[in-house]
Image (cartoon, grey):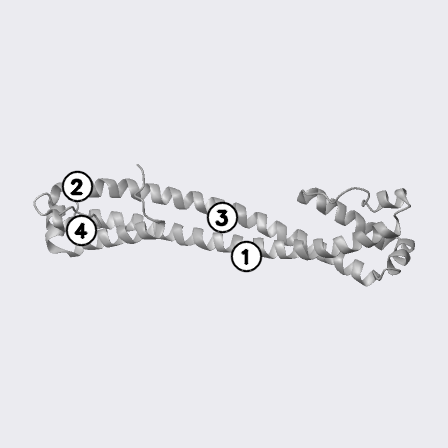
Amino acid sequence: MSRPKLSEAELLERNRVALENAEQQPEIASAMSELGYDATKIAEGKTLLAENQQAYNFNKTEDDETSEAYNSFTANYDAIDEIYRKHRKKAKVIYRKDPLMLAKLNIDGSIPRSYAKWLEAVQKFYTEAIADTAIQEKLASLKISLEELNATQAQIGELKTTRASYRREVGESQEATKKKDAAFAKIDDWMSEFYAVARIALEDQPQLLEALGKVVKS
């Protein structure tokens, strides 16, 4: 069944109002009850609606958490990338005539675009620099201190943590989306039959379909 062109929030509200009025509006309740949609049957729909609402809310929460995790990850990435580019630029000046050192620090080529290769290059640079006092002395000549190198390496550790958190949230959000979509599909099917029966039950009073969320042409 193709879903009506409503937002998910609008669809939830339409279904809520339809089920509420099918139970509370006397004329509708009486007509629907005669065709099997009594209080027990309507309660069945309300249960599906509650499950749908819960799945929708949970998915929204997961999406929000994914956005927060992504923002945290990108903020860390941008901060490291900015300082790395500055350090890299200075190191390339220092070792411009020393291809072996350029290769050792992994700065003899261009900065990789993919995250994995970028991370590999960044880690290589700081690992080598922190482990070699001779490199530290050279870098210090252009005002790159050991403290800066250590601080950036610590940031790299934080970056890995935030990226792992982001990837975890993406997975959880995708799973929540599947469950939400399944819940919508389930109640869509139930409401499809509900409306089909309502059209028959209210055939002589079509204006009452408005109370169930269906626009009736005048």
Q: Estimate how packed mark 4 is, as few (under 14), some (14 to 19) or many (20 or more) residues with alpha carbons within 10 Å.
A: few
Q: Amino acid at mark 4?
A: Glu
* Residue denoted by label 4: 210
Q: Amino acid at mark 2?
A: Val
Question: Pointer 1 and pointer 2: residues touching (CB < 8 Å)?
Answer: no
Discs 3/4, front: 4
Q: CA distance from mark 1 to mark 2?
A: 45 Å
Q: CA distance from mark 3 to mark 2?
A: 36 Å
Question: For residue 71, which quarter of the picture?
Answer: bottom right
> Which is nearer the N-term, disc 1 or disc 3?
1
* Position of residue 158 measured from the top left corner of the image (x, y, whole percent): 68, 56
Query: Which numbered marker is on residue 197?
Result: 2
* Position of residue 66 measured from the top left corner of the image (x, y, whole percent): 53, 52
Q: CA distance from mark 3 to mark 4?
A: 36 Å
Q: Residue at x 60, y 57 (%)?
A: 72
Is 58 placed above or below 116 here? below
* Residue denoted by label 1: 68
